[in-house]
Structures are given as structure tokens and as C-alpha cells.
Amino acid sequence: MPRKPSELPRDLLCDQLGTPIGTALLVTDAAGMLRALDWDGHEDRLLRLLRLHYGENTILSASPAPAALRRALNGYFAGDLKQINAIACQTAGTPFQRTVWAALRKIPAGKTMTYGALAAKLGTPAAMRAVGAANGANPISVVVPCHRLIGADGTLVKYGGGLERKRWLLEHEGAEIAPRHTAAA
């Protein structure tokens, strides 16, 4: 059941975290719960998703992210991949979106899955496009690992932070990925 607007946080806090693949934008609520993670240079997408999920009247203020969140993300980027599993996060979104995002968190680091395989795992094998749309509306990059979804042919497709970041994340996690395609000569 969708949450009532009165149950959604109106005031959100934003911090930045340097990572090997650029500056991450961390959005938390007053309780320190991670609500969004996106990338510097993708602020328009971040703001669009925040308005979509939390309403037009959402206020975003600069404030340090909780130390535990920063430590867990730094640990992940330093190679302790399990650190992100302990990060508490919460999203708005539709029930279907939240189901897809929960399923993404169950894909282990170092593994990938196709959109079709995730749709089938959710019991809706014909819903590949709906899974793709939910994946694209995921406001919490890395922690809700949308980068672990790949195309049916094993290629890297559709990552809001850019395909080079997706490639880096998957290589960092030890996933086997298809070689880069080159244009025919």
C-alpha cells in the first residue's frame, strides 16, 4: 500500500562522499536513514526522483551524513563489499518498485542478473520492462544495487550514473561481465 504523504519525510539532508568513481550524494532523513544515493553531475536526476518519491514540497538541506553510513560506504569502496548490506535505507515508491528494490538487495556482490531473470524471480516473467522502469527509478544507487542488472546478452545497459561507473562497480565486486563492444570497422 502506498504511504500517505503525511508519512513521508518532508525535510531531507544531503552530504557528499568522495569515492573512487566520483562524488556520491547521500540523502538521509532526520533519523539517519539513507533515502537516496546518486552522483555528482546527476543532481537533476536526484532531485527529480526525490520530488517523485517524496513530493514537490520536499526540502533538501546540507548536513553531514551519519558516521556509520559514511564508514560503511568507505568500507565497501575499500573492498569490504558486505558493508553495504548493513546500511539501513528506506524508499518511497510504489509497492512494485519497493519489491524490485528489495529483490535487488538480495543479489550478492559479484553476481549479476538479467532484467528478465529478476522479473521471473518475482513471479512476473512478462514484466521485464516494468522491472527495468522500477530499476531506473531506484533512488539509492550502490546500496540498492541496480548496477547488478544486465542485458539479456550479458552486456552492460542502463545505469543512471553512467556505464563506466557500472562497469567499475561490477569489476570492484568481482562480477564477470561481457567485454566492451566495439564498433565494426
Image (cartoon, rainbow, N blue to C red):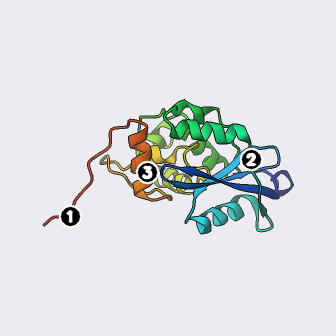
The residue closer to the viewer here, 158 or 175, is: 175
Q: Furthest residue to the right? A: 6
Residue 31, by quadrant, is top right
Work out whether mark 1 precedes mark 2 in sequence or the reverse, and give the earlier one.
Answer: 2
Where residue 142 appears, x then y in whole percent? 54, 45
Q: Furthest residue to the left? A: 185
- Discs 3/2, front: 3
Q: Amino acid at mark 1?
A: Ala
What residue appears at the point 52 percent right and 43 percent down from the top-left corner? 145
> Residue under circle 1?
183
Element under label 3?
helix
Work out whether mark 1 precedes mark 3 in sequence or the reverse, and give the earlier one.
Answer: 3
What residue appears at the point 48 percent right and 34 percent down from the top-left corner? 79
Please say whether residue 95 is visible from this viewpoint.
yes
> Residue under circle 3?
166
Which of the numbered marks, if any, corresponds to residue 1? 2
Element under label 2?
loop
User: Label 1 to label 2, Cα distance in Å?
Assistant: 46 Å
Q: Residues within 10 Å of mark 3 (few under 14, many from 20)?
A: many
Element under label 1?
loop
Residue 176, by quadrant, is top left
Where residue 134 appears, x then y in whole percent? 56, 53
**114 in relation to 50, above or below:** above
